Amino acid sequence: MSWDSYLDNLCAQSNNSEGIAAVKRAGIYSLDGGKSWTSDGHPHGLVIFPKESQKIANVMKSGDFSDFKENGIVLENKHYFFISEFRYDKGVIGRLEGEGVVLITSSISAIIICHLDEENAHRLKDGVRAVFAISDYLKSCGM
């Protein structure tokens, strides 16, 4: 099963009052090993290397973000600085000047990652709302 429609939904969940999405790219990966749940080449898909998604899966599964704090978050061969972890749920925020912001959270069995480009990095609230809408939905389904 492909989860591509969830990427479209995540981006749509980040729309502001004018209908402009803050999240342009996203991905859903297995919490157990980091395997992508979405198709390669999806217009809203991230292109994360397996080594990157495996590391993210390991950190998210452990709930210990010290590796991200010390070494940053690597996505698409770019090093994002760890900014913060979410206080109310398991997740992190990373930032790379000129690239934008990444938000990562997990459900019971999945990692949800979204990217806000530099132009929309200030719309963090919209991105957080979108990534948690998908995460909360997956949790409600036992996933």
Image (cartoon, grey):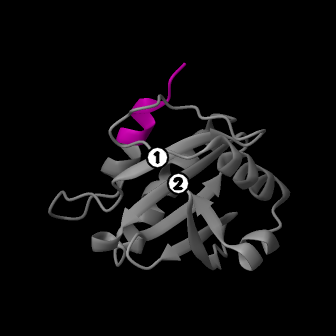
Residue 8, disc: none
Mark 2 to mark 1 CA distance (whole Å): 8 Å
The residue segment tinted magenta is 1-8
| Main secondary structure along the magenta-highlighted residues | helix
Residue type for callout 1: Leu
Residue found at the far front of this picture? 77
Q: Is residue 118 above or below residue 18?
A: below
Lower position in the chain sequence, tag 2 or tag 1: 1
Q: Quadrant of the C terminus?
A: top right
Residue type for callout 2: Glu
Residue topped by disc 1: 46
Residue drawn 46% across the image and 70% down it: 101
Q: How many marks?
A: 2
Instruction: Decide which of 24, 137 is in the foreground and name it.
Output: 24
Q: Are marks 2 and 1 in contact (CB under 8 Å)?
A: yes
Please tell me whether mark 1 sits on a helix, a strand or a loop. loop
Residue found at the far left of this picture? 18
Q: Where is residue 57 shown, x and y percent of the image?
A: 73, 49
Residue topped by disc 2: 76
